[in-house]
Amino acid sequence: YSCSSVSSEHVMGFEVDSINSVQFSNHTGYAHWKGQVLTADELHVLYEGIKLNNVNHYDYVLTGYTRDTSFLEMVVDIVQELKRANPNLVYVCDPVLGDHGSMYVPQNLYPVYKDKVVPVADIITPNQFEAELLTGKNISTEKDAVEVMDLLHNMGPDTVVITSSDLPPRLGDRFLVSLGSQRIVMPDGTSTTQRIRIEVPKVDAVFVGTGDLFAAMLLAWTHHYPTDLKHFIGTKVFLKIFSLLMHHVIQRTISYAHEMAGPGRRPSPAQLELRMVQSKADIEDPAIVMEATVL
């Protein structure tokens, strides 16, 4: 769980029990960091304490960055136990593995995500590299992306969002393409799939925490829709999240960073920390400034 996840959930009115999968001095976008990685045994002890007090009643579980396979396997056990107690629980998983062809977690996490984590998730938010890794299929075209999202659906999740891709944008090189897919189960037991494509403006900077924020806001805005939240979210939710993340928070952050860095100087990691507090009003109700295409 990251600070951006917790703070945004608090702003949205959620009571959050947060467990740090890693306890680092700072995020890994800095040149140096120190800290510890939580083990499965340590996670188990924390969860047992929650159970002993009979307060392990949750509507949502959200997971992101971790570096330990046993920890990840323990997360699966806990999610399955929580789902037995509450079959309506929604598990949102950001399968953090890497980006642009490189892994930034140990490679032995990949099979655990593929074989154990994704099958119990209801919503997953991989980037293109992670989606390709989990399915074994490359994405070169929009058709490939749809097939990859269908493969991910078949692994378990009803909602799949490829948060960023290398697909050619229709609006020009200053944009990147994101895609979402929802498999909706109808009352008669049949299913239908809704897919959308969103083009979002690129920003010439590296931000840390945007994936965490995206997954947290997807969870939060899912909660605000009155239908069967586990199976249906709606295009408007995607648009609100992308507008919040790619326009409001990032634009505010990059403006602040350039102001602090000064003319002609590239902002530092410290100056590029997401401006979460300053974005409180946008987190609560982001104005929609983007359009989606239904595929």
Image: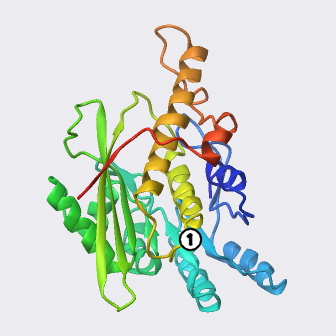
- Binning the other alpha carbons within 10 Å of mark 1 as few (below 14), some (14 to 19) or many (20 upward) gives few
Question: SS for tag 1?
Answer: loop
Front residue of 217/43: it is 217
Q: How is the image coloured?
A: rainbow
Residue 152 falls in which quadrant of the image?
bottom left
Residue 60 falls in which quadrant of the image?
bottom right
5 horizontally vs 96: left or right: right
Where is residue 193 drawn, in percent x and y?
29, 72
Front residue of 94/158: it is 158
Q: Residue at x 54, y 43 (%)?
A: 28
Front residue of 209/74: it is 209
Q: Amino acid at mark 1?
A: Pro
**On the image, numbered disc 1 is attached to which residue?**
226
Q: Residue at x 55, y 10 (%)?
A: 262
Q: Is residue 210 above or below residue 9?
A: above
Give the number of callouts.
Answer: 1
Q: Residue at x 63, y 70 (%)?
A: 39
Residue 113 falls in which quadrant of the image?
bottom left
Where is residue 120 drawn, in percent x and y?
46, 80
Where is residue 285 drawn, in percent x and y?
60, 46
The quadrant of the image that shows the C terminus is: bottom left
Front residue of 273/143: it is 143
